[in-house]
Each structure stands twice: as structure tokens, then as C-alpha cells.
Image (cartoon, grey):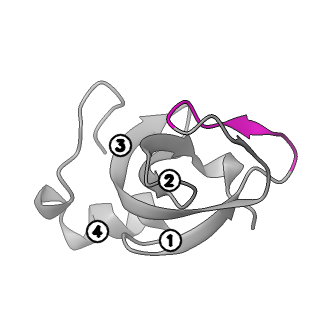
Amino acid sequence: MKELNENINIKELNDRDLEQVVGGYKVGDTVQCSPDMIAYCSNCGRLLKNYDVTITGIRGVLNGKTLYWVERKCCGHKSSIIETEILG
């Protein structure tokens, strides 16, 4: 699996890597985030709790946790989240 210091092009992953990294989530899924904390959107200035994002790619792995590229529904801001932020 590729490390965090490399941006991953989703098209370069083989099926095995894709299954290993994405697990139950895939690119294009809309998920709810931040169940236990309030996040700040640096683009629109909103404080967010239980907010929706769409997964747009896989950033990498940090300490065994997957990092995803996402687009926030509040204003379309693109950022990254770690899998533990997803309300599951």
C-alpha cells in the first residue's frame, strides 16, 4: 500500500489494493462525518457537526488508518479526512 507522502491516483490501484484501502467505502460514496467533535470549514467559515462529504479519492494510510480526499457538502470545499471521522 502506498504511504501518506504519496498522493494516490485511484486509477493506478489494482483491485486488491482498492479493496484493502477502501474497505466498506468507495469513491463517490456520501458519508456522514464528525460525530464526536465540531469541525471548522476554512472555506465558508461554518462550524460543522454530523456533516456530509463525498469521497473523491484515497490520500493514503497513516498509522494503519485510511485517509480520504473528500468534498464537503456545505460549500464544495475539498479536503481530507481520516476514516475514524466517518460516522459508522
The residue most toward the front is 44
Type of amino acid at the residue the image marks with label 1: Tyr
Kind of residue indicated by mark 2: Cys
- Expressed as whole percent of the image width and height from the top left, the position of residue 62 reads 50, 32
Who comes first in sequence, dot 3 or dot 1? 1
Q: Which residue is mark 1?
A: 25
Single out the mark in the foreground, 3 or 4: 3
Expressed as whole percent of the image width and height from the top left, the position of residue 88 reads 75, 68
Task: Let me know if residue 72 is in the magenta part.
Answer: no
Of marks 1 and 4, the one in the foreground: 1
Amino acid residing under circle 3: Arg
Specify which label sits upstream in the sequence, 1 or 4.
4
- Report crowding for label 4: few under 14, some 14 to 19, many 20 or more residues within 10 A (C-alpha): few
How many angstroms separate mark 3 from mark 2 (CA)?
Answer: 21 Å
Circles 1 and 4: CB atoms closer than 8 Å:
no
Q: CA distance from mark 2 to mark 1?
A: 22 Å
Whole-number angstrom distance, CA of label 1 to CA of label 4: 14 Å
Task: Tell me which label, 2 or 4, sits earlier in the chain.
Answer: 4
Residue 20: x and y in percent read 41, 62
- Mark found first going from the N terminus, 3 or 4: 4
Any part of residue 63 in sight:
yes
Q: Secondary structure at mark 4?
A: helix
- The answer for how far apart the CA atoms under marks 3 and 4 are is 17 Å
Q: Quadrant of the N terminus?
A: top left
Q: Which mark is residue 75?
A: 2
* 51 and 60: which is toward the camera: 51
Categorize mark 2 by other alpha carbons within 10 Å: few (<14), some (14-19), many (20+). few
